[in-house]
Image (cartoon, grey):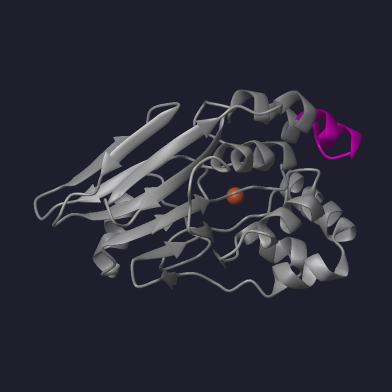
Amino acid sequence: MRYLILSDIHANREALSAVLARVRRKRWDKAVFLGDLVGYGAHPNQTVEMVRALKPLVAIRGNHDKVCSGVEDGEMFNRVALQAAQWTRTRLTQQNLRWLYQLPEGPAIVDDAFAIAHGTPIDEDAYIFGEIEALNVFRQTTFPLCFFGHSHFPVVFGLSPEAIHTVLTTSPTFRFRLEPGMRYLINPGSIGQPRDGSPLASFAIFDSQSRTVSINRVAYAVDRAQKRILDAGLPRPLADRLALGR
Ligand SMILES: [Fe+2]
């Protein structure tokens, strides 16, 4: 099976379109979404509909999906994120809002092959930034392989019986094979708001047969996404950061 792994789209239609155009020529069998479909960007309905159209699809919710659809009120959000979530809630169609509202909490197990989580498999809203958080998750779980999102930073944490390793990915394509006896926590990066210093949209493909993962970066019309954010009256920092990848 070839799994298309998508995370943190954040209503960025331009970025998602570029990713889907790229994978149209690649074969994939199942789409897997790690949460945060909306919030920040200017096209919540379009991006929800684009993801809903991917079949077959396994999807879990992110913290922004919860606040934008009314599962939570966003009291932990900063001012900009909350403003974007409130704007998003007024724009979503009833159907899309309901679809987001019913997205399940992670972790989920996909085909007995791997786990997925938004933040971590222990707490959907917690972050894995570095080895300390990764080690903590490895210790409290037994998954050999888990894909996670939320930090918007593409990275691989590998745990051998002796040590934990961090592998930073390289652009535009980073391909590696999972080694037997190792456990992995892998972030495919963010499609709609990358934060690793590169503005390129980021996604992964996992081939369960060859046990290889590729993390791929795709250029898209950042200026168009920025213009849409400003035209919508959303906070300017949400537009500015897209060009910086921060
Ligand atoms: Fe996110």
Residue 45's place in the image compared with 113, above or below, is above
Note whether residue 76 is visible: no
- Please state if 113 lies on the left or on the right of 31 as rendered: left
State the image coordinates of residue 238 (x, y, percent, origin top left): 73, 35
State the image coordinates of residue 32 (x, y, percent, origin top left): 51, 59
Q: Residue at x 69, y 62 (%)?
A: 52
Note whether residue 160 is visible: yes
Image quarter (top left, top right, bottom left or bottom right) of the N terminus = bottom left
- Please state if 167 lies on the left or on the right of 221 as rendered: left
- The dominant secondary structure in magenta is helix
On whether residue 232 falls in the magenta region, the answer is yes
- Relative depth, front residue between 170 and 207: 207
> Magenta region: which residues?
226-236
State the image coordinates of residue 66 (x, y, percent, origin top left): 68, 66
How many numbered marks does the figure carry? 0
Image quarter (top left, top right, bottom left or bottom right) of the C terminus = top right
Q: Which residue is drawn at 79% across and 65% down?
A: 96
Q: Which residue is drawn at 18% across and 49% down?
A: 179
- Relative depth, front residue between 163 and 214: 214
Q: Quadrant of residue 23 in the image?
A: top right
Residue 6's place in the image compared with 174, above or below, is below
On whether residue 51 falls in the magenta region, the answer is no
State the image coordinates of residue 20 (x, y, percent, origin top left): 62, 43
Q: Residue at x 29, y 67 (%)?
A: 143
